[in-house]
Amino acid sequence: MKPWLPLLLLLLLGQAGAAGDDVVVIGNSGLPKTDKITLQRLYTGRIVSIGQQTVMPVNLPAGSPVRDDFLQMVMDQNEEQYTGYWLVRRYVGKGSPPKELGSVDEVVKHVIATPGAVGYVPVSKVPPGTNVIYRR
Amino acid sequence: MQKRLLNTALLTLLAAMAMPAQAVDLTWSGFGTFGYARSDQSFNYQRFIDNGGTVKRDTVVGAQVDARFSQEWSATVQAKAAPSDHSDSQWQASVAWAFLSWRPNDDWLIRAGKIRLPLMLNTENSDVGATYDMARLPLEVYSIAPTTDVVGVSISKTWLGDSFDLVAEAYTGETSTYWRYYGRDRTIDNANSPGSWFLPIDMKSSGLVLTARSLENTFRVGYHEGEASRPGEKTGAGFEYLNPPGLYRLLPGGVDKLRVPILTLGASVMLPADFRLTSEYAKAKIESASRGLSRWGAYVALMKRMGAWTPYVYYAKTKSTDGALGLYQQINANAGAVPAPLRSSQTLMADLTSPYDQSTVALGTSFWVTSKSVIKAELSQVRTGIASSFVDAPAGSDSGNRHINIFSLSYSFSF
């Protein structure tokens, strides 16, 4: 057996695992299920509520692969487009982008503990009993 | 007024601090443009651009802090440093924005404090070069409103649609600003040398703006009603021709305030193959002695995004009313007919009419280094018709029938 084969196998499995780990959107308990259009509006600051409940979305930092997946899957945008959108919106005085948390674990903890909080995480990181409000 | 603005900023912060005690989410951001522009003419265009080159036309740095107290309440303060709006030789640090925002639900947004007005498509973000592709927003259109900021209140209502969001924004407020004048042979105070001076003006302004916006397309129409007055003085008196001695002079008297109605229209649409077409139009009417301030301006720009590059071309034009340009021509012609010692008094009267008749063709490109920083380069040619008050005409001459070639290079960033 070639010595590099296990390493290649590991890399391929890793890639397959990442590709299969869909991003889902979680919300604090009590928030209703929602749809892609609503999330697009929420993460672009055009709405501040879901189903009459005030919500506060959080983001992962730019460069996070999970954020990239979320932007692609839900926002139909890439990082450049999303950052560019908020750059203009901030400087026309219509608000600032969602607060950024440093890691997936922080997002999970924040969303579970904060009324109205909404965030996105890989499906594999969703603790049992968490309120998943959107999945593809 | 600076004191009042400072108070507004402080009040905004104090009001913000008086919000229900919650974790405040503070976000700092900064922006800037370092711009160089050079023309092929020895006289100044747009206050600063000549054949010696300048960094004063486009350079600006600023910082903004957004404080979010909850999803409903937030406050924003923006400060900037740029060439002064009331001196051609000084720089000025100022509070550009300072307002408190209340967003009770998805549809309503109420802002109070120092706000920038939704005049043209990029008026609100005009200081932040990293938010648009053109090296310089077409002055023919973006200079028409006498002021872009007020201390007041803005209320906007949004109707969310499947493809477009419709936003209606009403505002009212007041501010103190300056109108710049340039006398090619003499100023209002100094009969012996040419130069600029800045007339202090108090402005009240109210307006209603409708914007339809999708992620790719924007349409905007606005009507703005301004009221201009000079602190402690009357304004708006016209000119009279005294014969003998055959001279124009300013009429004494005038009115306490001038009505300034402004109409604005704008559209920016995405076309196939990543082309974007943007066009804006504005028209203002100001019945002052400076009749040339009653003018229209328009431009059409075509740009195409090609990876990091966005080349563009635009054509812009502005023109004062025929009556204003006719008056300028009469007085200017009279300057050539009177004895030499009296000539400067007549060119001063002509310059006071503030005539505008010029067009610009520009070819440029932006290169996006990152999504928050951009390098821009532009070549433009300005052609003046009867006259243009954007040109500081050389002594003994005038601003009509000039061709000015301008090269601009800038780097804009935000963080």
Image (spheres, helix red, strand yellow):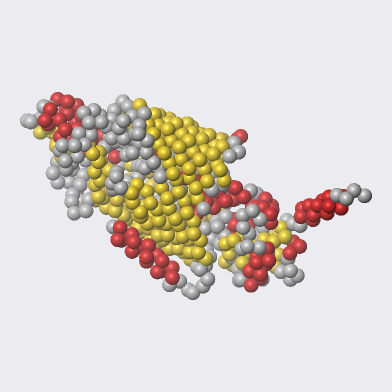
Left or right: residue A91 versus residue B164 is: left
Nearest the eye: B308 or A54? B308
Seen as rendered, the residue at the extreme left is B244
Residue at figure coordinates x 63%, y 48% from the top left: A78
Q: Is residue B61 above or below residue B40?
A: below
Q: Position of residue B94 (x, y in %)?
A: 36, 55
Left or right: residue B67 versus residue B347 is: right
Residue at figure coordinates x 35%, y 26% from the top left: B403
Query: In this orientation, does residue A20 appear?
Result: no
Seen as rendered, the residue at the extreme right is A1
Q: Position of residue B214 (x, y in %)?
A: 56, 47
Nearest the eye: B8 or B45? B45
Left or right: residue B232 versus residue B209 is: left
Nearest the eye: B137 or B299? B137
Quarter of the image for residue B246 reads top left
Q: Position of residue B412 (x, y in %)?
A: 48, 45
- Please give the count of numbered marks on the rendered protein: 0
Query: In this orientation, does residue B343 appear?
Result: yes
Residue at figure coordinates x 28%, y 35% from the top left: B392
Residue at figure coordinates x 20%, y 47% from the top left: B235
Q: Is residue B305 above or below residue A104?
A: above
Left or right: residue B343 versus residue A121 is: left
